[in-house]
Amino acid sequence: MKPPKFEYFAPETLAEATALLAEHGDDAKILAGGQSLMPMLNMRMVRPQVLVDLNGVADLGGVEQHLGGGLTIGALTRQRELERSPVVREAAPVISAAMPYLGHVQIRNRGTIGGSLSHADPAAELPALCTALDAQFVLTSSSGERTVPARDFFVTDLTTALEAQEILTQVRIPPPVDGSSWGFYEVCRREGDFALAGAVCMVHLDASGTCQDARIILFGVGGAPVRADAGVGALIGTKPDAASLQKAADAVSQELEPPGDIHASAQYRKEVGGVVVRRALAQALEGRSQ
Ligand SMILES: Cc1cc2nc3c(=O)[nH]c(=O)nc-3n(C[C@H](O)[C@H](O)[C@H](O)COP(=O)(O)OP(=O)(O)OC[C@H]3O[C@@H](n4cnc5c(N)ncnc54)[C@H](O)[C@@H]3O)c2cc1C
């Protein structure tokens, strides 16, 4: 299939891009890697009058590490760069570890971090990763810039806090907390498919091995990344072992109310939701330090 007719703009600066969005509002769509937008255009699921291509805009890509260890990632940074960047591997290794699960290498060569976050597929890895890492997103329009925490950005299926005239320009990841470790686990039918259920976790143990804090975020089991606070409650204050991981997984599974669809039933996702949490937590406790 071919896309419907649209007018194409290729701005070279952020100011030009935001001016185009201010002018065309809801009639415009941003084009980044095109890995979700082009199929949606070809299937006529979206019919924008105008495409604003960000690929020629200077300074929207790249990864930078700050003193203290935090990261700034430009929205146009390709998913493949996240996978291969030594800076990401050092400052946010859970992202490097998760990227090979995002589609296929050809998709990651073009797909961008900003495109994945803005598209907000409920089964996508990057929204859950950024929520687990407590990232902040910078949204820019012709009238200025605002910063939205990842936990408030994802509203539901393909819906975010972005306004029509805004561009997600930067992802900011805070420095890792000393003593924290991470885990990532997903289940899908075939390599490269979207996950049926997945989990990202960050665990902070003190010197005695007692869990002081944790964050468990699931994907593929709700309209947006799902915080598994019941699982966190089961871990805090314990010295996690196989029994407490199982308890946390059971608490998560019990609390989940996932949707069923052609890929998996709701009951399947509810059970597998607990399994992915237990396996991600087990990885964290193997000492994958953040
Ligand atoms: C076969 C296949 C398998 C895939 N498997 C997976 C998978 O397993 N996991 C996964 O997470 N993804 C998967 N994807 C999707 C892929 O990750 C896309 O790259 C991603 O969803 C969109 O990124 P993009 O840069 O290509 O954005 P585009 O397709 O260009 O844009 C997507 C949407 O975001 C908007 N947008 C893009 N950039 C910005 C921005 N900076 N600010 C505001 N709005 C913006 C666009 O207007 C559009 O609405 C798959 C895709 C395909 C085709």
Image (tube, rainbow, N blue to C red):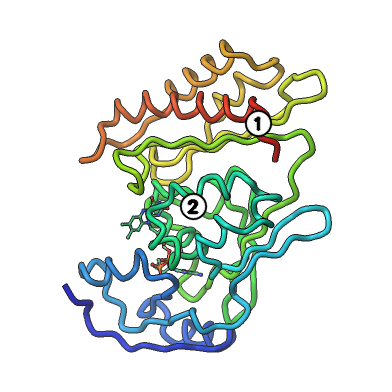
Tell me which image quadrant ligand 1 sits in: bottom left
Residue at 65%, 65% (x, y): give it: 63
Disc 1 designates what residue?
A: 214
93 is higher (above) or lower (below) than 40: above
Is residue 56 shown to the viewer in this render?
yes
Image spot of residue 265 (x, y percent) = 25, 31
110 is higher (above) or lower (below) than 96: below
Disc 2 secondary structure class: strand
Residue mark closest to the camera, 1 vs 2: 1
In the depicted view, which residue is nearer to us: 173 or 287? 287
Q: State the separation of the CA atoms marked 1 and 2.
A: 20 Å
Which one is earlier in the sequence, the residue at label 1 or at label 2? Answer: 2
Disc 1 secondary structure class: strand
Q: Residue furthest left?
A: 1
Q: Residues within 10 Å of mark 2 (few under 14, many from 20)?
A: many
- What is the number of callouts on the image? 2
Q: Residues within 10 Å of mark 1 (few under 14, many from 20)?
A: many
The amino acid pointed to by label 2 is Phe
Quadrant of residue 64 in the image? bottom right
In the displayed structure image, the side of residue 87 where residue 127 appears, left or right: left
The amino acid pointed to by label 1 is Ala
Q: Residue furthest top?
A: 243
Is residue 151 shown to the viewer in this render?
no
Quadrant of residue 173 in the image? bottom right
Residue at 26%, 72% (x, y): give it: 41
Residue at 46%, 62% (x, y): give it: 118
Number of the label disc, if any, that sits on residue 202 = none
Image spot of residue 136 (x, y percent) = 64, 56
Disc 2 designates what residue?
A: 154
